[in-house]
Image (cartoon, rainbow, N blue to C red):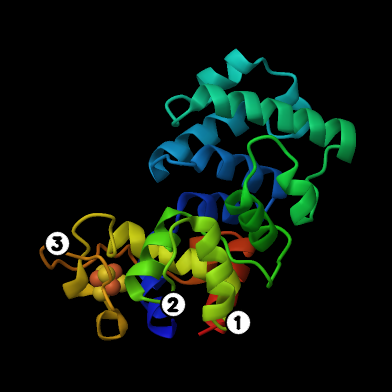
Amino acid sequence: MRALARAIDNLDLPAVEKIAEESHEDPFEVLISTMLSAQTRDPVTAAASARLFRVARTPQTLAKLTARQIQRLIYPVSFYRHKAKHVRETCRILVDRYGGRVPGTMEELLALPGVGRKTANLVLILSFKSLKNICVDTHVHRISNRLGWVTTRTPDETEQALYKATHPRWWPYINLYLVTWGQNVCRPVYPLCGDCVIYDECARVGVTREGATTAPSPRPSAPDSARGTRAGTRRRSARRAAV
Ligand code: SF4
């Protein structure tokens, strides 16, 4: 895990992590952008979130939009019609039941329309600073199985198995590490095993064909102070502190 933590330092952050940085880990923006991100490529999630938040940045203002208006703003995220409906209903509940705030418990988050464990865990980790959650998406599920850490069929099974298979100090960072690695190196098809810093520790379960070796594309390094907000600095510092 330490090798992964160091290896991702110069790679692009996942879209929701970037949004969390830029919004100072605002729970509402993290919640809505994570809802939009399901089965959607990162650039599409980032652009759709930016369009939506330019028009409505609070539950109160977003709840006043029609589902059709939200659809137009978030298109072409996958399942944009369903997501628009869920986002609008969620905002109404946040206004009516929570005074416009995002609740901070798993139980309350899971009761919101369109919010599953992946979204709830990411909100708790990024915005409520929980150290007790693991957020499992398709990248975390796939890579955990390839590594041989778990043998599971669904992301929910993977989450529960990872609580047993990994040290608690890594739990809030597993999503960041494995999603970044999954987008750049351990890709769904043709993973770049020849470039992988954890090749020697990986069982490569289910990997039948590897991609041609090529170095992952780094982004230019810059001091934290030049790269983002104070929130971003905190997140990066926390990431380094775990190494
Ligand atoms: S060695 Fe290959 S399968 Fe294993 S984590 Fe690295 S890229 Fe993924």
Up the image or down, 31 lies above or below 61; here it is below
| Ligand 1 quadrant in view | bottom left
Q: Which of 118 and 236 is in front in this view?
A: 118
Crowdedness of circle 1 by 10 Å Cα count: few (<14), some, many (20+)?
few
User: Which residue was labeled with disc 3?
Assistant: 211
Q: Earlier in the sequence, mark 1 or mark 3?
A: 1
**Residue at position x 45%, y 31% from top?**
77
Quarter where residue 83 is shown:
top right
Up the image or down, 24 lies above or below 243; here it is above
The spot of residue 10 in percent (x, y) is 36, 69
Q: Nearer the viewer, residue 226 or 195?
A: 195
- Pointer 2 and pointer 1: residues touching (CB < 8 Å)? no
Q: Can residue 237 be seen in this view?
A: no
Q: Is residue 96 left or right of residue 152?
A: right
Q: Nearer the viewer, residue 39 or 213?
A: 39
User: Which residue was labeled with disc 2?
Assistant: 5
Crowdedness of circle 2 by 10 Å Cα count: few (<14), some, many (20+)?
many
- Pointer 1 and pointer 3: residues touching (CB < 8 Å)? no
- Pointer 2 and pointer 3: residues touching (CB < 8 Å)? no
For badge 3, the amino acid type reads: Gly
Q: Distance between the residues labelled 1 and 3?
A: 32 Å
User: Which residue was labeled with disc 1?
Assistant: 169
Q: Is mark 2 on a helix, strand or loop?
A: helix
For badge 1, the amino acid type reads: Arg
Q: Earlier in the sequence, mark 2 or mark 1?
A: 2
Is label 2 or label 1 in front? Answer: 1
